[in-house]
Image (cartoon, rainbow, N blue to C red):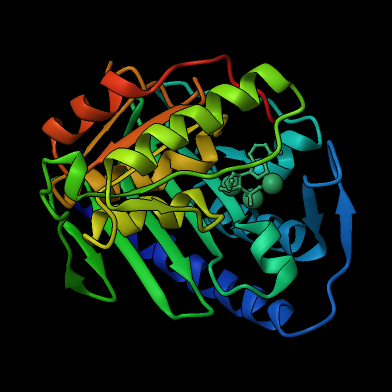
Amino acid sequence: MASSDVEKWYQAAVDVAKEAGVIIRDGFYKAKKVEMKGNPRDLVTETDKAVEDMVMATLHKTFPDHKFIGEESVAAGAKCELTDAPTWIIDPVDGTMNFVHSFPYTCISIGLWVDKEARVAVVFNPILDQLYTAKKGEGAYLNGQPIKVSGQKELSKSLVMTELWCRPDEKKMKIAYSNAMKVISQSHGPRCMGSAALNMCQVAQGGADGYYEIGLHAWDVAAGKLIVEEAGGVVTDITGAPIDIMNRRLLCVSSPELGKALTDILEIYEEERD
Ligand code: 2AM
Ligand code: CA
Ligand code: CA
Ligand code: CA
């Protein structure tokens, strides 16, 4: 891979994320037009759609041969397929529920994957002006400053992020909450902030030590994976096996030891959520 390619991808990703940031910030301080997707807690706003359209059109103009996976395009019927071809994986607004409530933990997430590996990643929270970036092999950065994971190995000294949402299936809900109870009683405590991409960035910058979730999509983790790994963290399937970002299960930790401590106690169930 020519390094000039990587630079071009990286600059395009940062530029378009900043442009998206203007749209998100603009919408954040106004009344929102909200629609329901799958269920009353699965929302989409005109900002999600406007950002995704703009980001895809802009990147397509610069890279006409590249492929795209975006949350709202997939919702509208586009294929969600990761091949070896260069593929931009985009979550236009991660943390839509936060956005709707004007809770300032929301971002755009953009990852470029080539040969099924992340090469360039950008996660931008335009409300708090936090720009997380990474290029494969070149470290992870927050607003241009290098970041690294805490390196914490012990669950008993860890802050662990997860999301607690209402599952339609009571059995799965019980497993999810019993997992959370185990983590709560064996760690420094849980954090549920409502954006998978920013949760991963929080692990990358050492603010949290781990994050796990079942039911995520490729666009939630495509950028965060590279940012965490370049910050020295470990990203796996929730079983500890290598992650398949299409498989909807995530464990992201500051050290392999903490990963093992979590996989030892987490019970796995089949993902739901759309
Ligand atoms: P979103 O805001 O892009 O939808 C919080 O629990 C995380 O889960 C967020 O990253 C959020 O992404 C995602 N999420 C929210 N509702 C979801 C749903 N119905 N199905 C799958 N993921 C969802
Ligand atoms: Ca969504
Ligand atoms: Ca998302
Ligand atoms: Ca989204």
Image coordinates for residue 187, horizontal then vertical, percent: 27, 45
Residue 88 vs 97, above or below: the answer is above
Please indicate whether residue 105 sits to the left or right of residue 212 in the image.
right
Q: Residue at x 13, y 41 (%)?
A: 154
Q: Quadrant of the C terminus?
A: top right
Question: Left or right of 38: which side holds 217?
Answer: left
User: Where residue 225 sits: x, y (%)?
Assistant: 33, 41
Asked if 40 appears above or below 4 in the picture, the reply is above
Q: Residue at x 63, y 80 (%)?
A: 25
Please tell me which residue lies in front, 242 or 199. 199
Is 82 drawn above or below residue 31 in the view shown?
A: above
What residue is shown at x 72% (from left), y 70% (from top)? 101
**At which x and y percent is residue 76?**
81, 37
Image quadrant where residue 79 sits: top right
**Can you say which quadrant of the picture contains the N terminus?**
top left
Specify the quadrant of the image occupied by residue 55. bottom right
Could you tell me if residue 8 is visible in this image? no
At a point 51% along the width and 76% down the height, the residue shown is: 126
* The one of 132 and 64 positioned closer to us in this rendering: 132
Q: Nearer the viewer, residue 4 or 47?
A: 47
Q: Nearer the viewer, residue 77 or 44?
A: 44
Q: Quadrant of ligand 1?
A: top right
Name, please, the residue furthest toward the front: 185
Q: Quadrant of residue 255?
A: top left
Q: Is residue 255 visible?
A: yes
> Where residue 253 sits: x, y (%)?
24, 40
Q: Is residue 7 left or right of 121 when viewed as pictured?
A: left
How many labels, in total? 0
